[in-house]
């Protein structure tokens, strides 16, 4: 029988992330699993060619990562009581980084939110959750927002 001992919980550190963390915590407590909580900061490397010096972009990304690491530390402490959990900030394209880390860490399940975008927003922004679900070789539990998304 399959066991779930390691959970990757992908968050964007928005208000909706608390609901995602609740599900990951519930699973971890019920199954005696540990949780790796990840947030992916954008690399912004695609903007180097737009007359923006690479060091300016690197500094900006560095500031995002530093802020995200502080937010992550507080988020994990607040949202994963009684669970072995650690946070990690990744840099790059969210879906790709989530899948890479899931493989590297040999997680048994991914828990993540979905923004529930529809129509043109979904076409323009895509869905990180959808990309992860389509490409993952482990189960993925997606949590929709509890409040309706305004369009």
Image (spheres, helix red, strand yellow):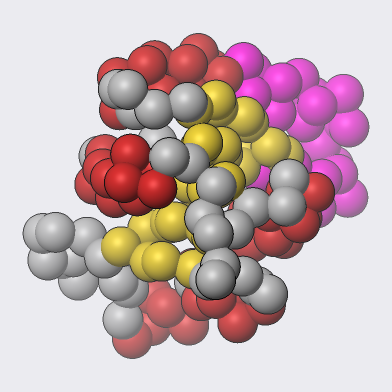
**Residue placed furthest toward the bottom:** 119
Pick the residue in front: 31 or 140: 31
Which secondary structure dominates the residues rendered in magenta? Answer: helix
Pick the residue in front: 107 or 29: 29
Residue 105 occupies which quadrant of the picture? top right
**Residue placed furthest toward the front:** 1
List x then y, in percent, for residue 126.
52, 74
Please name the residue shown 37% across and 58% down the image. 113
Q: With respect to residue 69, does 41 lie above or below? A: below
List x then y, in percent, for residue 98.
65, 54
Task: Give the left or right position of residue 29, taking residue 96 as reference.
Answer: left
Please name the residue shown 62% across and 70% down the image. 138
Residue 64 occupies which quadrant of the picture? top right
Give the tally of numbered discs: 0
**Residue placed furthest toward the left:** 147
Q: With respect to residue 19, does 2 lie above or below? A: below
Residue 80 occupies which quadrant of the picture? top left
Q: With respect to residue 144, does 102 lie above or below? A: above
Task: Give the left or right position of residue 110, taking residue 151 as reference.
Answer: right
Is residue 12 highlighted in magenta? no
Task: Give the left or right position of residue 27, taking residue 85 as reference.
Answer: left
Which contiguous range is marked in magenta? 42-66
List x then y, in percent, for residue 23.
29, 50
Report whether residue 144 is seen. yes
List x then y, in percent, for residue 41.
62, 38
Which quadrant: the C terminus? bottom left
Please name the residue shown 87% across and 24% down the image. 55
Please name the residue shown 54% across and 59% down the image. 3
Which quadrant: the N terminus? bottom right
Report whether residue 64 is seen. no
């Amino acid at each position: 029988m399959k066991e779930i001992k390691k959970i990757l919980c992908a968050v964007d550190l928005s208000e909706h992330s608390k609901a995602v963390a609740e599900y990951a915590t519930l699973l971890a407590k019920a199954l005696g699993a540990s949780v790796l909580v990840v947030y992916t900061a954008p690399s912004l490397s695609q903007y180097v060619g737009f007359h923006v010096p690479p060091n300016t972009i690197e500094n900006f990304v560095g500031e995002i990562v530093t802020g995200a690491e502080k937010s992550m530390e507080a988020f994990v402490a607040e949202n994963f009581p009684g669970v072995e959990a650690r946070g990690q900030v990744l840099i790059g394209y969210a879906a790709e980084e989530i899948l890479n880390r899931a493989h590297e860490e040999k997680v048994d399940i991914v828990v993540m939110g979905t923004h529930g975008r529809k129509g043109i927003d979904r076409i323009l922004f895509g869905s990180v959750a959808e990309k992860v679900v389509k490409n993952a070789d482990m189960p993925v539990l997606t949590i929709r927002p509890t409040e309706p998304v305004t369009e």
